[in-house]
Amino acid sequence: MTHTHAGRTGRAIALAAGLTLAIGAAVAAPAAAARPQHHDPTAPDLGPNVIIIDPSMSTEEIQSIVDDLADQQRDAEMTTARHAVLFLPGEYGEPGAPLHVEVGYYTEVAGLGAQPDDVTLTGTVEVYNRCLGDDENPNCIALVNFWRTLSNLAIHVDGTGQDGCRASANIWAVSQAVSMRRLDISGGNLSLMDYCTAGPQYASGGFIADSRLPYTINGSQQQWLVRDSEVAGWSNGVWNQVFSGVEGAPSEASFPAETYTTLDTTSVSREKPYLYVDDDGRYLVRVPAAQRDTSGVSWADGMTPGRDIPIGDFFIAKPGDSVKDINNALARDKNLLLTPGVYDVDRPIEVKRADTVVLGLGHATLTAHRGATAMRVADVPGAVIAGITIDAGEQESKVLLEVGKRNGNHGHHARAARSNPTTLSDVYFRVGGPHIGKADTALVVNSDDVLIDHTWVWRGDHGVEGFTEGVNGDTDRWATNTGRNGVIVNGDRVTATGLFVEHFQQYNLQWNGEDGSVTLYQNELPYDPPTQADWTQPDGTLGYPGYKVADHVTSHRLYGAGVYVFNQNNPAIVTANGFEVPEAPGVQLHHIMTVNLSAGTIEHVVNGVGGTADNTNTGTPQFVIDYPAP
């Protein structure tokens, strides 16, 4: 099945134009006095936006709580609300009387067990299509179902009490910035599309890691990465469906007739840190160790290998805490736990110590103000940044997150970093959407041996009222919501598993380091260049490739990737190549494609090779199986 993103843009913008949100002014909050931190290890203060669910609570009581939250968050795409729902170890729901949890925007649902099966939920945990139209054209899609997290629990699928079709599977209809981790799902199917509401039912996710899955219906999902998991079966693929270290994964032998890319193992992996409660009721954060050549779930034979950090070793931040206090805590060898909310930062949060953990709950969001870099990570091994979103502010930031110094002493920690890489897990970026945003580059990786395990780097193509206002509509957005580069990688031996980058005005991805490896890359070129001149390189090349490897690089690997074009503002615009890479024996691309989503042209897939994607073949991918050809 093929389809376009036209509904995502047009209807999402129409919806956003009707929102009446009070977005805060782009000024940093005044510095608060240092807040004393005396944690009760069995009852830490996780702030007002964390709901702790206890197995002593009745199913009816829990159902009421999660229903109220779903009602708040179902359409809250551009709000400042952030929430986490955490289940203490125990059993929830029962056969014939299940618990049904709907997950809305900026909501994390997670178990607090040491193992996924320590929290068992009989019922469903689901995301449905949003219907953005009217009765005549309901336009029910998952293309804007962003920013949700589900992790660390067992789900025994029981659709009792669901309306008709929805009793048939656990439905998880999502797109970017949505992760599923450490799940054990049984008793029914998992569907990655919502086939129970009106059409067109398009979806554009997604990411699963470290999970045991039942038979899974991919449906309309354009691209997906499953990493280090087990799956009982997989129904179909649309474009790039990538499996890395997955037991039971489908074969890639018939690609592109079946669009599967299957790697036996994952070369470098580290599971995301997770909060859990031990047998004595104490809260700890488990920090999984980095691994090489992995497959299957990390918890099959006991706890995921790694280390525990007591909650007392964290500075537990709440919105309003100053960056000064956060940095002082980090300088005192504390780790950082960001509770759900939006944090205005006018200077960088500085992560300088090896093995520091920064963990966000409930999509905690850092908003850069006064042109700040929101976070800097030093050239140290083992730092882990996980579960945060970084927003650009209205004054341009040179970079939103910087890992290492461009001319830093990378060699000092080289040996340690190769076995203990700095890791970014579920770290998302946004330039525009809830407000105008400006950034030269969202993410810069200067350090060597960094692991990027799932990120979405997004220059907004739609947003709240005023985001696209102006005489020339999208032309005004091109000039005001500016993001030139999505991701720039300067370090060597950087690995990415699940790299999603969209809509930047020059390079979405520019890879300058040696020995890089990317498993699943998804890109949409910007929708809104006003003219061809605005989308032409200084040397006269038409457009910027969605994936660029620098000419001097001699070793680079890419597995499963797509670059999409939807030049909504000016359909006459042409891009020469979806991918541009140096002609070197060590640069290898496997299973790549371009596609026209309804407007614009990509002349070739890579380096002048591959078919043209234009409005004569809308929705039909142009594939290159291997580049260079064997």
Image: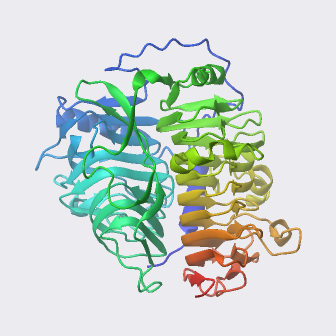
Q: Residue at x 52, y 40 (%)?
A: 384
Q: Residue at x 55, y 62 (%)?
A: 8
Q: Quadrant of residue 396?
A: top right
Q: Position of residue 558 (x, y in %)?
A: 57, 70
Q: Position of residue 489 (x, y in %)?
A: 68, 56
Left/right of residue 564 with respect to residue 358 in the rendered view: right
- Of 374 and 293, nearer the camera is 293
Residue 14: tell me if it is visible. no
Q: Quadrant of the N terminus?
A: bottom left
Residue 110: tell me if it is visible. yes
- Of 267 and 276, nearer the camera is 267
Q: Is residue 377 above or below residue 130?
A: above
How many marks are shown on the rendered structure? Answer: 0
- Of 172 and 77, nearer the camera is 172
Q: Is residue 282 above or below residue 612?
A: above
The figure's colour scheme reads rainbow
Left/right of residue 572 with respect to residue 427 in the rendered view: right
Q: Residue at x 41, y 80 (%)?
A: 252
The residue sitting at the left extreme is 96
Q: Position of residue 574 (x, y in %)?
A: 75, 77
Q: Position of residue 231 (x, y in %)?
A: 29, 65
Left/right of residue 236 with respect to residue 222 in the rendered view: left
Q: Quadrant of residue 459?
A: bottom right
Q: Quadrant of residue 352?
A: top right
Q: Is residue 312 above or below residue 364?
A: above
Q: Quadrant of the C terminus?
A: bottom right
